[in-house]
Image (cartoon, helix red, strand yellow):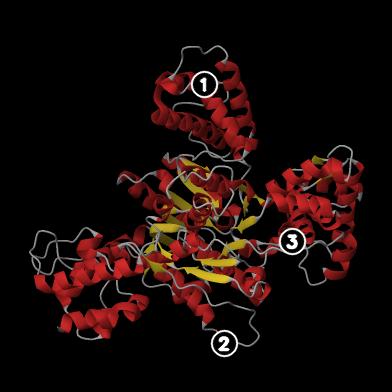
Amino acid sequence: MQNPDEILAGLDAEQRQAATTLSGPVRILAGAGTGKTRAITHRIAYGVATGVYNPYNVLAVTFTARAAAEMRARLRDLGAHGVQAKTFHAAALAQLQYFWQQAIGGDVPRLVEYKTHLIMEAAQRLRMSTDKATIRDLAGEIEWAKFNMLTPQTYQQQGAHRTMPAGWDLVAVTRLFQGYEDLKSDRALIDFEDVLLILVGILESEPRIAATVRNQYRVFLVDEFQDVSPLQYRLLKAWLGDRDDLCVVGDTSQTIYSFTGATSDYLLDFGQQFPNATQIKLIRDYRSTPQIVDLANRLLQERTKSDRPSLPRWPEPLELLSQRETGPEPVFAECSHDQVEAEWVTGQIKELLAAGHKGSDIAILFRTNAQSAAFEQQFSDAGISYQVRGAERFFNRREVRDGILQLRAAAKSADGIAGTAVIPRMKDVLASLGYTAQAPQQSGAVRERWESLNAIVNLAQDLVEARGDQVTLDVVVAELDERASHQHAPVMDGVSLASIHSAKGLEWDTVFLVGVTEGLMPISFATEDKNVDEERRLFYVGITRAKTRLYLSWALSRSAGGRANRRPSRFLRAIRTTTTKAGPAAEPKAKRSTRAKIAKCRTCGTVLTTGGERKIGRCDECPPTYDPATFDKLVTWRKDISTSDKVPAFVVFTDATLVAIAENMPTDLQQLRQLPGVGPKKLERYGAEVLAILSS
């Protein structure tokens, strides 16, 4: 177990407050990239290290298996062993299986992982004609109903406002919903929503079982609280009982799953439910550059300024403050048609890869999965490795399951094979499933299968690098089994292709947001104000996935020679600066635009290459032009502020910003605000003190 002071080291002031506020209800409003996972895991670890928490009495709940796995790994590193970190469904399923005999008796029903097959069968029984795409929409509608605790009967009464899947009306969907429920009942099956519903019923009707659960778990933490559904919130209240040791973390600006029943109301109204709750805001963005953060802030501010009375509830968004050095300006590219857009994006990525950037640090994000195909084909033609995220779960893929089985069999006759010798042996085993040394050129299923097998090889290589000769085939198989039990997929090589929804919680150094047109962003069926608001939040999530470079592109028509009847997204109004006309004919103009933005040293005229040089307007070779005594006063002042506020010195102002202040010697707040690194919050907090130092 780590020393409590060591656990708090490196946290900023707000993160430290979150980590040390250990009792009572706590609401943490955490913006994108503000280190919320760091804050909440350090909070748990600090509570355990100080003896306030018994680790076995703590339950941390999140929404994805990947996020839960990351939380467990961080807690282990911090010495907080024994803490349970699970998804809502995993925690509920474990409790349901444990209490089933006591509460209900008999065998626990089998779990339906994919309800689409049963829905298709129910539709056929009812002689209802449908296709696979519509089946997915119907599955989503049934999930929404169950997350809102509706039965087929109550759904028909309350679903009149819902937009039905194409070709279906409320009565037909209700009949299918009932048919699906009947089919599950006939076969003793339950789905994921049933797990929560049944457990809620048990906890609310069986006082002894509820008391057992509440005695086991006394401290609760819920991440991504803006995504909680009415059913999940009811389960949380059943877990809590009359206690209030609850910490919730979320960001209303990242509420993007309303179609599943998620609502940010519980996060917004937390203070009404718990009047004595402590509120903490995390606004220091450690992920993205100031240019990207400014873009994201402006996107939300445009909606915040809207004053039409009929608009739905829009909570004041967090205004993020980037803690990173300045970076390149976001690029806006307009293309004549879809093919040109795909070619332009591919060309930009080829340049990045040639410059030494890793493919795994690059992502293409889109609104609908259908947009992926054009980029997959371009990448295959260009020999660029890629992976499609958000498709079938990694460990559920047939090639992955077969690969693990074959590796397990091979391990029985692999005595003496360890360390680096494991890798060629694995490649030989996986070759029968389609693995080759070079990636296949075609797209589709063949390429996806190869990427899956290659991810297994890469995982083994990482293990060998970390543990050396301790790694055997048995060790690799054990690692894969452990990850499979938690659906913790390995990081795959190559550029990521993903819908914005599936990119939530992830980040990349470079992000391409493609297809930014009306009809896609916002999506065409977002006809109501509340739906358009959700699309804005979705766009915000896409922007804030980028750490350093952000490209936004759109095409004016579907194909070459087609009518240019598409319009850039309305969301670009508040954020677009200059626009590149992408395509071969526009290349000279794009180059001229690039040359015009080149920054040069104000002393010798040399091109400035680093963010620090551009911030102060001078290359490192030229001597400073500030008064050393003034600079020393600024440094001393910064040290005093960082000590009193208990934050790192760079959080106050970076060295480059202090140099810029000393060299420019601003005489008023307006001049000070013009300097890079001095945002509105810092101007309000430190402006008067800085000007006083300069005037003295």
Residue 654's spot in the image, x, y percent?
A: 26, 65
Disc 1 and disc 2 in contact, CB within 8 angstroms: no
Question: Which secondary structure, mark 3?
Answer: loop
The kind of residue tagged 2 is Asp
| Disc nearest the viewer among 1 and 3 | 3
Mark earlier in primary sequence (1, 2): 2
Question: Which secondary structure, mark 2?
Answer: loop
Could you give the CA–CA distance between mark 1 and mark 3, rounded to whole angstroms? 47 Å
Residue 31's spot in the image, x, y percent?
A: 49, 65
Residue 509's spot in the image, x, y percent?
A: 40, 53
Within 10 angstroms of label 3, few (less than 14), some, or many (20 or more) residues? some
Q: Which residue is mark 2?
A: 307
Q: Which residue is mark 1?
A: 473
Q: Which residue is mark 3?
A: 241
Could you give the CA–CA distance between mark 1 and mark 2, rounded to whole angstroms? 63 Å
Mark earlier in primary sequence (1, 3): 3
Question: Which secondary structure, mark 1?
Answer: helix
The kind of residue tagged 1 is Leu
The kind of residue tagged 3 is Gly
Count of numbered badges drawn on the protein: 3
Could you give the CA–CA distance between mark 3 and mark 2, rounded to whole angstroms? 41 Å
Within 10 angstroms of label 1, few (less than 14), some, or many (20 or more) residues? many
Residue 666 visible in this rendered orientation of the protein: no
Residue 599's spot in the image, x, y percent?
A: 20, 66
| Residue plotted at (55% across, 84% down) | 306
Residue 566: image quadrant is bottom right
Q: Which mark is residue 117?
A: none
| Disc nearest the viewer among 3 and 2 | 3
Quadrant of the snapshot with the C terminus: bottom left
Within 10 angstroms of label 2, few (less than 14), some, or many (20 or more) residues? few
